[in-house]
Image (cartoon, grey):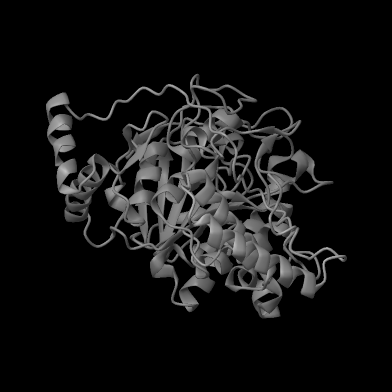
């Protein structure tokens, strides 16, 4: 369909693509009798999903009243490749050298809690953090363990590298689920991913990054960009040279006339969605609040320096601007750094310790601590949940190339901000950070915790391709991490 404005927004938007119906097995724990009873309430103006979600809200809010719905927004601080547990949140100073590595530990602001010495700035912020030291995906492949961490649902089968989005692995991402529950605001969608997608070597995109069986209309916006470049502008937001302001104004006027006539037509949902996306594109092009959110040049240079003048650092700063503008979930993916070992990522199969010391940990520590401090100073931390996460951890032992390999049997995740109890260390791993001993947490529980803090009960229903209600997660909020 041609663009009625004559303008392309240059974003990864799917406007009128056809969603292929797929079969999906429902297993939501609702009996046939209960379903019939709830279905009969339709005459009273209540749909089945509304009734179930309403009951779930009451139940869950009663169990965790202080944290439920505390977060207005979420920032997923995604360290693609897998951040190592030994050098970050779960060091083992008493383990042999071949396990603990060359680095020491440092004390944190939380009494008795020590972390890796390469995180000095984060060490001063642990009073805001809840660290889970016994997260288990039981999956040792990037794309399939990544799918589980991105969706809260295990990949079938486990440990399948170079997995792609295809049945039965079509569960929607956290951002896509949020888009089903939160309206787009101010010309921006409820969920955005930047500065690029996550892919294995060969540009094999991981599953779990889009809306899956929900349909493309719920995909998070994928914005490919580099906010660290000089005079950064969002790709596609400049008017073509041949389109003068006068011609642009004329085309908007024509579009408004078409919209007025279209009101008399019987509109389907996809047509309505097209109108929404068109208005969002116009808002971005015409300098509205949405476009202002992407104008990172408005930031104080000192603030930009604090986040780090590199792609990931400035992308995280952009994420803060987007949640300020009303976006409910922003996922920021660590990107490869050309010319560095292991492509500059956290998949450190060679020169593990050198990469951590020289660039990975200093960059991460700078940006993560800047985000937490910035949110706190702006009075936003209490209403913004930050999740420090990757697809898995790393092996206890080093390999022959001085690297650590994939390890989904025990790793760490940190949460901070809206609804999270600070100064918490939950879970215990063994002497080598190889297996959980206590407090084991699954990816679905992390998803449930995020949803809970956003005010979305775990029993909240979305619709499968057949229009049947299905719970957004099978996880349980991590009570130890909640206020």
Residue at 24% x, 43% y is 47
Residue at 71% x, 65% y is 251
Tell me: 441 left or right of 349.
left
| Quadrant (top left/top right/bottom left/bottom right) for the N terminus | top right
Tell me: 476 left or right of 218.
left
Front in this rendered view, residue 370 or 167: 167
Residue at 42% x, 44% y is 133
| Quadrant (top left/top right/bottom left/bottom right) for the C terminus | bottom left
In which quarter of the view is residue 464 placed?
Answer: top left
User: In the rendered view, would you say 173 is above or below 303?
Assistant: above
User: In the rendered view, would you say 95 is above or below 303?
Assistant: above
Q: Is residue 441 visible?
A: no
Front in this rendered view, residue 468 or 461: 468
Residue with the most extreme right position? 242
Return the x and y of residue 104 as percentages of the image width and height.
57, 52
Front in this rendered view, residue 217 or 118: 217
User: In the rendered view, would you say 106 is above or below 37?
Assistant: below
Return the x and y of residue 21 as percentages of the image width and height.
48, 26
Return the x and y of residue 478 as percentages of the image width and height.
31, 47
Return the x and y of residue 90 as percentages of the image width and height.
48, 46
Tell me: 306 left or right of 424.
right
Residue with the most extreme top position? 157
Q: Is residue 340 visible?
A: yes
């Amino acid at each position: 369909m041609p663009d009625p404005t004559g303008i392309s927004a240059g974003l990864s938007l799917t406007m009128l693509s056809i969603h292929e119906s797929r079969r999906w097995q429902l297993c939501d724990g609702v009996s046939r009798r209960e379903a019939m009873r709830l279905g009969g309430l339709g005459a009273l103006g209540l749909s089945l999903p509304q009734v179930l979600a309403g009951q779930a809200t009451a139940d869950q809010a009663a169990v965790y009243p202080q944290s439920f719905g505390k977060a207005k927004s979420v920032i997923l601080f995604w360290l693609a490749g897998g951040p190592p547990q030994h050098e970050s949140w779960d060091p083992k100073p008493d383990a042999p050298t071949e396990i603990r590595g060359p680095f020491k530990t440092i004390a944190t602001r939380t009494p008795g809690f020590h972390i890796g010495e390469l995180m000095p700035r984060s060490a001063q912020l642990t009073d805001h953090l809840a660290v889970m030291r016994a997260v288990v995906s039981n999956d040792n492949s990037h794309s399939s363990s990544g799918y589980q961490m991105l969706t809260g649902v295990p990949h079938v089968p486990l440990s399948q590298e170079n997995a792609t989005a295809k049945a039965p692995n079509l569960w929607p991402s956290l951002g896509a689920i949020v888009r089903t529950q939160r309206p787009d605001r101010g010309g921006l969608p409820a969920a955005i991913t930047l500065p690029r997608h996550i892919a294995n070597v060969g540009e094999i995109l991981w599953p779990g990054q889009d809306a899956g069986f929900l349909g493309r209309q719920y995909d998070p916006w994928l914005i490919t960009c580099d906010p660290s470049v000089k005079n950064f502008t969002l790709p596609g937001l400049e008017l073509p040279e041949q389109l003068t302001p006068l011609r642009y104004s004329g085309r908007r006027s024509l579009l408004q006339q078409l919209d007025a006539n279209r009101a008399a037509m019987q509109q389907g949902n996809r047509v309505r969605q097209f109108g929404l996306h068109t208005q969002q594109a116009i808002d971005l092009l015409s300098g509205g609040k949405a476009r202002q959110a992407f104008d990172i040049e408005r930031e104080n240079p000192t603030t930009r320096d604090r986040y780090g003048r590199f792609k990931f650092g400035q992308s995280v700063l952009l994420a803060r601007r987007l949640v300020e503008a009303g976006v409910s979930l922003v996922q920021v993916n660590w990107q490869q750094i050309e010319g560095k070992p292991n492509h500059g990522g956290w998949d450190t199969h060679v020169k593990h310790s050198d990469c951590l010391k020289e660039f990975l940990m200093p960059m991460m520590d700078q940006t993560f601590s800047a985000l937490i401090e910035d949110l706190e100073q702006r009075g936003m931390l209490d209403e913004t949940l930050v999740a420090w996460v990757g697809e898995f951890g790393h092996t206890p032992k080093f390999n022959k190339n001085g690297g650590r390999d994939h390890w989904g049997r025990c790793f760490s995740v940190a949460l901070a901000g809206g609804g999270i109890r600070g100064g918490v260390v939950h879970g215990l791993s063994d002497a080598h950070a190889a297996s959980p001993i206590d407090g084991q947490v699954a990816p679905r529980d992390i998803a449930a915790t995020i949803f809970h803090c956003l005010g979305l009960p775990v029993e909240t229903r979305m619709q499968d391709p057949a229009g049947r209600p299905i719970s957004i997660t099978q996880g349980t909020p991590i009570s130890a991490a909640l206020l």
